[in-house]
Image (cartoon, helix red, strand yellow):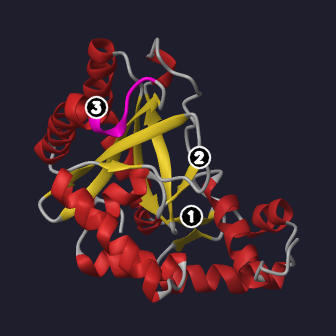
Amino acid sequence: MTDAVIEPVRRSFVLLEALSHRRTSTLAVLTGETGLPRPTVVRLLHTLIALGYAARVSREQGYRLTDRVLGLSESIRFVDHLVDAAIPHMRRFTEEHGWPLYLATLGHGAITIRHSTAPESPMSFEGASLNSRRPVLISALGRAWLAFCPDEERRAILRDIGRLTRRQEAALDAVLERVRRDGVAFTEPPRPTRLQGMAVAVRRGPRVLGSLSIRFPRSAMTEQVAAQRFGRPLGRLARAIAADVARTGRAGEAPR
C-alpha cells in the first residue's frame, strides 16, 4: 500500500466492488467479503445510500447498487461506442493501404490507445499496444487532440500535465498552429526513433472525440510524403468515424 492511497476512499471502493458481485448482499456477506469491520461497512453503506449509489432492499435481502453507478462508467461506454464505430473504417483503410492505424482517446494527462489494426497489417513493426499511454505533448495523437480541442479543454489538459515555461508554451503554440494549418500532426520524440506517427483528430463540431494515427518506418517515407499520400485519406476516415458516432446519437457523450 502506498502513501498515496487514502484509506476511507479505498474502503469505499472495496465495498462498491463487493456490492457489484451480486444483485443484493446482506450486511453479513459484505462484512465477510470486504474484511472490513461491521461498523465501518454500516457507515459506508449509509453514505452510499445518502449519495444515491446504493439502496436498502429489505432486512432479509440486504443492499443493492442503484442505477446511478452506471454514470461512473459513462466515458468507458463512450470509448466502446467510438471503437465500434471506428473498427470497420480502420480495417478497410489497412486492407487498402497496408499501414497500421491506431485510435486513441485522452484522459488524465495522457493519450490512451483504444484500438489498432496492427495485428491485421502486413506492414506493422510493433504490437497493437492496446490501453498503452502516450505522452500528450510529443505524440502525434496527443498533438492532434490539443490542436483541435476547445481552448478551455486545452488549458485544462495542460494544467493536468504540469506547468510549462513561456518558451515551451510558445514552441507548443507554434506546433499546434502548424497542425491546424496542415490538418495532420507528427510525433516528435526526445530522441531519434525508427518509427514515426502521423495523426488527425476525430471531431464532431467543436469537440474532439478521438485521435487517429498511421505508423510507419522513417526509412519508408518522409513526413512530407506521408502527409501528401495519407493526410487526406486519414482525414476522410476520421470524418466517417465521427459521422457514424453521431448517427447513433452518442456524439455528445465524449469523455471530458
The stretch drawn in magenta includes residue 204: no
Considering only vertical position in the picture, is 136 above or below 162? above
Q: Which residue is mark 3?
A: 225
Give the residue type that dot 2 points to: Ser
For label 1, the SS is: strand
In the rendered view of the protein, which quadrant contains the N terminus? bottom right
Please report the bounds of the magenta region as a residue range: 220-224
Q: Earlier in the sequence, mark 2 or mark 3?
A: 2
> In the image, is 26 to the left or to the right of 96?
right
**Does the rendering let one see residue 116?**
yes
For image coordinates 52% across by 85% down, the residue present is 163
Considering only vertical position in the picture, is 137 above or below 242? below
For image coordinates 21% across by 63% down, the residue present is 207
> In the image, is 186 to the left or to the right of 72?
left
For image coordinates 87% across by 67% down, the residue present is 35
Q: Which residue is mark 1?
A: 64
The nearer-to-camera label among 2 and 3 is 3
Label 1 environment density (alpha carbons within 10 Å; few <14, some 14–19, many ≥20):
many
Residue 80 - label? none
| Distance between the alpha carbons at the discs numbered 1 and 2 | 34 Å
Prevailing secondary structure of the magenta residues: loop
Q: Residue 85 placed where, x, y %?
A: 26, 35
Q: Which residue is mark 2?
A: 132
> In the image, is 66 to the left or to the right of 249?
right
| Distance between the alpha carbons at the discs numbered 2 and 3 | 28 Å
